[in-house]
Amino acid sequence: MTVYEKYKKLNIDGSRIGLERGSEIGGYFCTPKGARVIGWDNGIHYCFIRGYGEMVFAVNPETGTDKYVYPLAKNFEDFLRLILACGHTAPVEQIIMWTEEQFKEFLTSDYNALMSGQQEVLDTITEKLKLEPMAAPYQYVKELQAQFDDSKIKFTDDYYDVLGLELPKGRKKKQPEYQYEQVVEISVTRITED
């Protein structure tokens, strides 16, 4: 049984740590092909992508960078350890656009203060899954992102349409599954008797 499967069996309220249950599909223009969503925090979703094993990715349709999809952890166990170190998915997800100073400042700010029920969820993960917080979360995520080649991630046609990008070489745009009927405009003249 994988760590992710063990985590799911805990049946905890993941919304307390930014891993709320929801659709496993995603459905945003930037959700990669083959994504299996494992949690939500507002519009941001976290997923595995077919072909990348247990690597955990963030999908952010309102990103503050030029990346809409980026890795956060080599596997789900490390992802949980990052959350244990930071208290929530939010600071982990935002490492991509922060300096280390900004990251550390956020961790100690009121924005990252523990909410009701959050510590209980973190304690359950620690105790039941026997995990410890990641020692250097900022360095871990930055190193993973620096080494990652995102050019192999596959997207739907919507991704290229929304961003105004050309489709990758050799790929043809799919025709929509629906067809519109041609609209013919008819003008009607009213005839009146004089």
Image (spheres, rainbow, N blue to C red):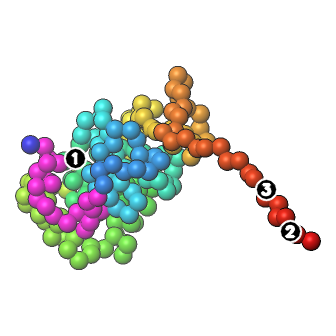
Specify the segment rendered in magenta.
2-22
Inspect the image, locate mark 2, and give the three-letter code of the amino acid beneath it: Thr
- Secondary structure type for disc 2: loop
- Secondary structure type for disc 1: helix
Question: Which of the two marks, 2 or 1, is nearer to us in this view?
Answer: 2
Q: Give the crowd class for mark 1: few <14, some 14-19, many >=20 residues within 10 Å.
A: many
The residue singled out by tag 1 in the image is 76
* Residue 54 coordinates in the image, percent (x, y): 24, 40
| Residue 152 seen in the figure | yes
* N-term-proximal mark, 3 vs 1: 1
* N-term-proximal mark, 3 vs 2: 3
Q: Residue furthest front?
A: 193
* Residue 168 coordinates in the image, percent (x, y): 53, 29
Quarter of the rendering occupied by the C terminus: bottom right
Q: Residue at x 52, y 39 (%)?
A: 176
The residue singled out by tag 2 in the image is 192
Q: Give the side of residue 65 with respect to residue 107, left or right.
A: right
Inspect the image, locate mark 1, and give the three-letter code of the amino acid beneath it: Phe
- Badge 3 vs badge 2, beta-carbon distance below 8 Å: no
Inspect the image, locate mark 3, and give the three-letter code of the amino acid beneath it: Ser
Is residue 19 shown in magenta?
yes
Q: Give the side of residue 190 with respect to residue 118, left or right.
A: right
Question: Which of the two marks, 3 or 1, is nearer to us in this view?
Answer: 3
Q: Which mark is residue 187?
A: 3
